Amino acid sequence: MKEQLYTIPVNDAFSKECECPICAMYEELETNSVQYTMGPSYMEDDVRAMTDEQGFCEKHIRQIFKIENKLGQALILHTHMVKTNKIIRELTSETKKSGFFKKQDNSQLIDYIHKLNNSCFVCSKIEDTFKRYIKTIHYLWEKDEVFRSKYKTCSGFCTKHYGVLIEEAGANMSGKYLDEFIQQTNEVYLSNMERVTGDLSWFIDKFDYRHKDAPWKNSKDALPRTLTKTNSIIWKEDN
């Protein structure tokens, strides 16, 4: 099958040595989105309007803070804080107008804070493209025999993205393709989870003096690979 623009990141991820190619795709999207946020785009009015409105989650503000652009970070956070202060001031003023002897209604204020705490410009930028990548996986599995072979022989998936692949398959596939995909995904996930579980078990056994001279086999990096399987983390030394 001729490779198209939207299939390239998916094929690339499934060609990597990784315990979850979906994590690899997400990580690349995340890196690109963080860099986009602190690139020239942060001076554009439409981008600034969204960052002012949404702010950032804890994970992504940490990644943004690592970028060497302190002035850009200060500008983005300043206008976000100005907007937040304005909205909260308006909401608290409305509460005061509700009446001196009436029970204060803070529901709008609480709703706004909840919304703010659960929004992130980087997360929202990633989300649409990530959904398209999942849909592309299902499309390639149906149409491309080479990709289907890659899928079957990959190193499996983390539990989170295994669930995403199964859940979204119903919307993107049907009939025999859907049944075969789910069966194959179950097999790929479980066989590779058991492989890493075995590596982790041997890693633990190596701390027993009885096994101190035994070979490590494939267990030396079992712990970081386990973090990918259980928590969708591609571990690096600077994490």
Image (cartoon, grey):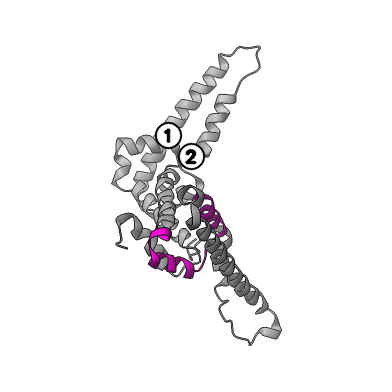
Q: CA distance from mark 2 to mark 1?
A: 9 Å
Residue 31 vs 19, above or below: the answer is above
Q: For the N terminus, which image quadrant?
A: bottom left
- Residue 119 is labelled as 2
Q: Position of residue 94 (x, y in %)?
A: 53, 18
Residue 203 vs 140, above or below: the answer is below
Residue 144 belongs to magenta span = yes
Pointer 1: residues within 10 angstroms few (<14), some, or many (20+)? some
**What residue is rendered at 33% in x and 54% in y?**
6
Closer to the camera in the image, 57 or 180: 180
Q: Main secondary structure of the magenta part?
A: helix
Residue 182 quadrant? bottom right
For the magenta stretch, what is the residue range?
140-168
**What residue is rendered at 63% in x and 88% in y?**
213
Which amino acid type is shown beneath numbered disc 1?
A: Glu
Closer to the camera in the image, 144 or 31: 144
Residue 147 belongs to magenta span = yes
